[in-house]
Image (tube, grey):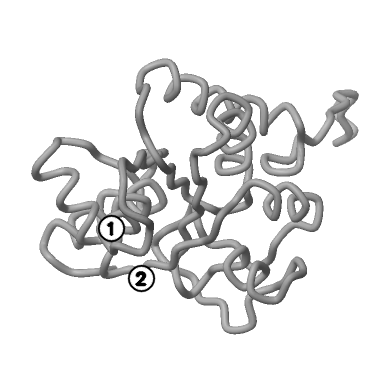
């Protein structure tokens, strides 16, 4: 007979506020340096910070002159707002979008100090720009990414970063079929 209780114990690992998660994401930065000798900046999607800050931590150790940028969707941009206010902040007029990996409402205080030491800025892009970048990546390069991954390409195409060689971290392929079909038909969900 089951009592409805379980004897299994667990430990919650926060995807953004755990050192090991940051270090795991930093491996991407190490791989970039291993494969590319010459680049000036990197753009990472910002949802909670582990992708961006893990990569920035690794890159700044190996290539201190590389500039690290976040990219956020304009209606859910806690890092952008926090950088402007000078303190970890929440998004006042937050909106859900199809870009699930970048729908943060607030800057995690535990990530704030790292962000201010490692990140040049956060680049805002809108859902139409991200949809356009996603179509371009799939049609021209056969790369399927979710909105957060395509957002880095949208940011690079927006010319909001300094000139030079830019690396875009394209992460995640978790996009549902209905959303993808809407985007491929030239619309933004």
**Residue pictured at 56% horizontal, 43% vertical:** 52
Looking at the rendered structure, the secondary structure element under dot 2 is loop
- Marked residue nearer the N-terminal end (2 or 1): 2
Q: Which residue is mark 2?
A: 126
Task: Say whether residue 24 is left or right of residue 125.
Answer: right
Q: Classify residue 113 as left or right of residue 21.
A: right
Question: Looking at this view, is 4 or 32 the one in front?
Answer: 32
Q: Which residue is mark 1?
A: 179
Instruction: Classify mark 2: residues with Cα within 10 Å, few (<14), some (14-19) or many (20+).
Output: some
Q: Name the outermost residue toward the bottom.
A: 93
> If the image is split into quadrants, where does the N terminus sit?
top right
> In the displayed image of the protein, which residue is found farthest to the top?
34
Q: Residue 36's x, y, as percent?
A: 35, 23
Looking at the image, which is closer to me, 173 or 176? 173
- Residue 30: image x %, image y %? 51, 21
How far apart are labels 2 and 1 at the CA level?
Answer: 16 Å
Question: Tag count in the figure?
Answer: 2
Which residue is depicted at the point 34% across and 43% down? 166
Between residues 14 and 77, which one lies in front from this camera angle? 77
Q: Position of residue 138 (x, y in %)?
A: 16, 43
For the residue pair 111 and 104, the one nearer the viewer reads as: 111
Residue at 29% across, 68% down: 189
Q: Is residue 164 above or below residue 76?
A: above
Q: Quadrant of residue 105?
A: bottom right
Q: Which mark is residue 48?
A: none
Q: Secondary structure at mark 1?
A: helix
Mark 2 near mark 1, Cβ–Cβ under 8 Å?
Answer: no
Crowding around mark 1 (Cα neighbors within 10 Å: few <14, some 14 to 19, many 20+) is some
Residue under the image location 53 percent in, 53 percent down: 46
Q: Position of residue 20 (x, y in %)?
A: 73, 27
Residue 22: which quarter of the image? Answer: top right
């Amino acid at each position: 007979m089951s009592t409805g209780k379980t004897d299994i114990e667990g430990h919650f690992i926060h995807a953004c506020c755990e050192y090991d998660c940051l270090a795991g994401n930093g491996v991407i930065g190490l791989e970039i340096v291993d494969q590319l000798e010459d680049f000036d900046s990197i753009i990472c999607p910002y949802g909670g910070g582990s992708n961006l800050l893990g990569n920035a931590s690794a890159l700044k150790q190996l290539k201190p002159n590389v500039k690290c940028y976040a990219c956020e969707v304009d209606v859910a941009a806690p890092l952008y707002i926090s950088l402007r206010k000078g303190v970890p902040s929440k998004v006042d007029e937050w909106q859900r979008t199809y870009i699930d990996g970048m729908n943060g409402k607030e800057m995690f205080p535990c990530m704030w100090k790292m962000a201010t030491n490692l990140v040049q800025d956060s680049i805002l892009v809108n859902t139409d720009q991200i949809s356009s970048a996603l179509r371009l990546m799939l049609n021209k390069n056969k790369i399927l990414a979710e909105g957060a991954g395509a957002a880095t390409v949208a940011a690079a195409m927006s010319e909001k970063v300094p000139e030079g060689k830019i690396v875009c971290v394209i992460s995640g392929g978790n996009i549902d079929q209905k959303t993808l079909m809407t985007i491929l038909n030239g619309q933004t969900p």
